[in-house]
Image (tube, rainbow, N blue to C red):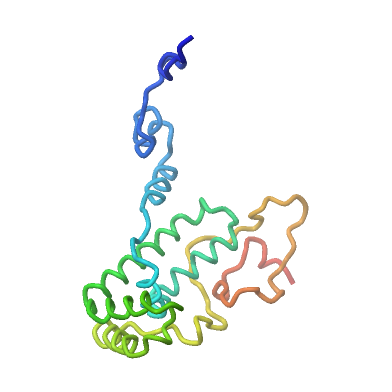
């Protein structure tokens, strides 16, 4: 007995390419605007920068996109739901894309030489490429104003400003929600002073 096709097995079936599934009339009509926006952000794709090039400009990127990166990490920590952080993930991708476009267009020669040096040495470390690193650091600082993130990327007491309200019970636990405001934060960044959760103003 021949195996029936999907159209034969499921009356009304309309074959749609996977990457265009959400654009089909039947599916699109059932999606709200938030879901459509989230799907578009997911389709953004990767940056297309090889690992050795990412390492070459890692310190300057960390400084240039410091706030959006930490805002995204704060969202992941508080929300525990990746869908609610797609907006901030998109900000990270946009910042990285803008940064590497400016660097590759303005400091092409020194960027390529430093990237190649990192790729060619067996340990893939900047310590083997100090001459190329100095030329690249000088170029991006003098021409673009991009400096390095100090202290190995750690900034004690960094305050993150965000338009997202802090969730009261992100994991939907039953029972009272524990007040953890007086416990030391495990990360080196937190919300700005003055932004509290709903009901906190009534606490002693």
On the image, the x and y values in percent for residue 87 come to 43, 56
The image quadrant of residue 185 is bottom right
Depth order, front residue of 152/131: 131
Quarter of the figure that contains the C terminus: bottom right
Q: Viewed as shown, does residue 89 lie left or right of 158?
A: left
Q: Residue at x 60, y 61 (%)?
A: 78
Query: Is 188 above or below relative to 35?
Result: below
Front position in the image: 154 or 3 = 3
Q: Is residue 115 left or right of residue 159?
A: left
Instruction: Tell me how many marks there are.
Output: 0
Which residue of the protein is positioned furthest toward the right in this rendering?
175
Is 179 or 122 nearer to us in this picture? 122
Residue 127 horizontal/vertical position (percent): 43, 87
Where's residue 19, x and y in %? 36, 39
Q: Is residue 42 left or right of residue 146?
A: right
Q: Is residue 50 above or below residue 124?
A: above
User: Which residue is depicted at the point 66% across and 67% down?
Assistant: 201
């Amino acid at each position: 007995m021949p195996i029936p096709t999907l159209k034969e097995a499921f009356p009304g079936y309309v074959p749609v390419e996977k990457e265009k599934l959400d654009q089909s009339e039947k599916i699109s009509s059932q999606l709200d605007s938030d879901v459509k926006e989230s799907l578009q952000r997911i389709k953004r794709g990767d940056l297309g920068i090889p690992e050795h090039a990412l390492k070459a400009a890692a310190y300057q990127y960390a400084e240039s996109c410091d706030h959006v990166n930490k805002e995204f990490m704060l969202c992941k920590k508080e929300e525990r739901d990746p869908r609610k952080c797609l907006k901030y993930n998109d900000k990270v991708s946009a910042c990285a894309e803008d940064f590497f476009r400016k660097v590759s267009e303005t400091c092409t020669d020194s960027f390529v030489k430093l990237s190649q040096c990192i790729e060619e040495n067996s340990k893939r470390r900047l310590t083997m490429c100090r001459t190329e690193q100095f030329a690249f650091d000088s170029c991006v600082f003098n021409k673009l104003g991009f400096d390095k993130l100090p202290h190995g990327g750690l900034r004690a007491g960094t305050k993150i400003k965000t338009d997202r309200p802090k969730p009261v019970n992100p994991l939907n636990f039953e029972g009272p929600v524990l007040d953890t405001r007086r416990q030391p934060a495990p990360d080196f960044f937190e919300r700005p002073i003055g932004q509290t959760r709903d009901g906190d103003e009534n606490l002693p």
